[in-house]
Structure formats: structure tokens, C-alpha cells
Image: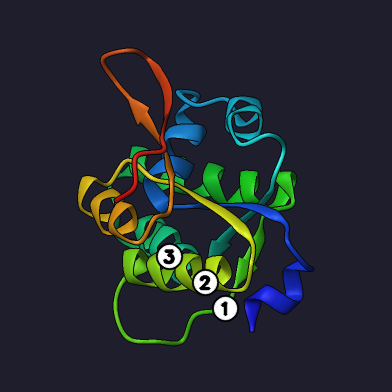
Amino acid sequence: MEAGRLGSAKRIVIIDTNTLLYMAQGLIPPSTLLEEAYYPRLATTSRVIEELNYIIGKGRPLDAKRARTALGLIERLGVEVLPWDGEGDADDSIEWVATNLKHAGHRVMVATSDRELRERLRMKGIPTIYYRRSRGGVEVEWDTP
């Protein structure tokens, strides 16, 4: 399982597609993401990689360019890609991986601006980091039930 690959009791931030695209646009500096989570290990899921590759192949030219840049960031930052072969989309994969890592004793956060995913994670007690356009920066949402 993924928890074993990441070691014991690590601080992990799982990054969603939209956050990677914001990073590719320069709206979220990678250093900000690292500082907000106190220098964690960064991870994403194979479903997020599939989503970025889909955007490269089928998206508008500007979106495809951002997706290529996001893939480059993943490599340059050493983001670990966790396998996902379950049913569902990238959000489902992130929720499942985050929940399982949390239950394995890791301190998990998810970087996403997807409101629905943030709500699902909040209900499971998983904090999120998200980009707030109105403030031009990232915020951490710690509120959990």
C-alpha cells in the first residue's frame, strides 16, 4: 500500500490537478505550498497524471501547455506518484489515498481548489490547502467535524 512506500508517520501533501495547473501558471509558488504544510513530502495519484495527459491531448493549446508544465513540476519537485487503479476520477483517487494514509498514521493534507472535494475531505477530518483568487494566495482549511 502507499503508506509503506512513504515511510512511517510522514507529513504528506497530496496535490490535485487544479493546484498543479495553478502552480504551472505561477499563481502558487511551490515554495508556498511547502511552507504552508511545514515542508512535507509531496505526492499525487496516477489518476491526476492521467488527467494532465488527457488535457495535453484534448485540451485547448494554453491548457495543454499548462498541463505539460505541471508534469515538469511534478518531476522537478520530486512529487511521488501513488498508484490508483480503482473506479472513479482523480478526486476519488485523492480522497481514497488521503483517507488511507491518514488511517496509517500519516499527517495528510490535500492541495485542491475543488470545493466538492474539500467538503468530502473536511467530513473525514483531512485539512486542505487551496488557492483563493480573491486574495491571490493559498489558505489552509483546518476546520474538520
Depth order, front residue of 22/128: 128
- For residue 122, the mark is none
Considering only vertical position in the picture, is 117 above or below 98? above
The residue that label 2 is drawn on is 46
Mark 3 Cα shell of 10 Å, populated few (<14), some (14-19), many (≥20): many
Upstream in sequence: badge 3 or badge 2: 2
Residue at the limit of the structure toward the left, as seen here = 116
Q: Amino acid at mark 1?
A: Pro
Q: Nearer the viewer, mark 3 or mark 2?
A: 3
Residue at the limit of the structure toward the top, as seen here = 135
* Residue 8 spot, x, y in % from top left: 77, 67
The residue that label 1 is drawn on is 83
The residue under the point 75% across, 75% down is 5
Mark 2 Cα shell of 10 Å, populated few (<14), some (14-19), many (≥20): some
Q: Amino acid at mark 3?
A: Ile
Q: CA distance from mark 1 to mark 3?
A: 11 Å
* Residue 52 spot, x, y in % from top left: 43, 58
The residue that label 3 is drawn on is 94
Q: Mark 1 and 2 residues: CB-CB less than 8 Å, in contact? A: yes
Asked which quadrant contains residue 91, the reply is bottom left
Element type at mark 1: loop
The residue under the point 65% across, 34% down is 34
Considering only vertical position in the picture, is 27 above or below 19? above
* Residue 145 spot, x, y in % from top left: 29, 51
Considering only vertical position in the picture, is 96 above or below 38? below
Element type at mark 3: helix
Lateral position of residue 85 relative to residue 133, left or right: right
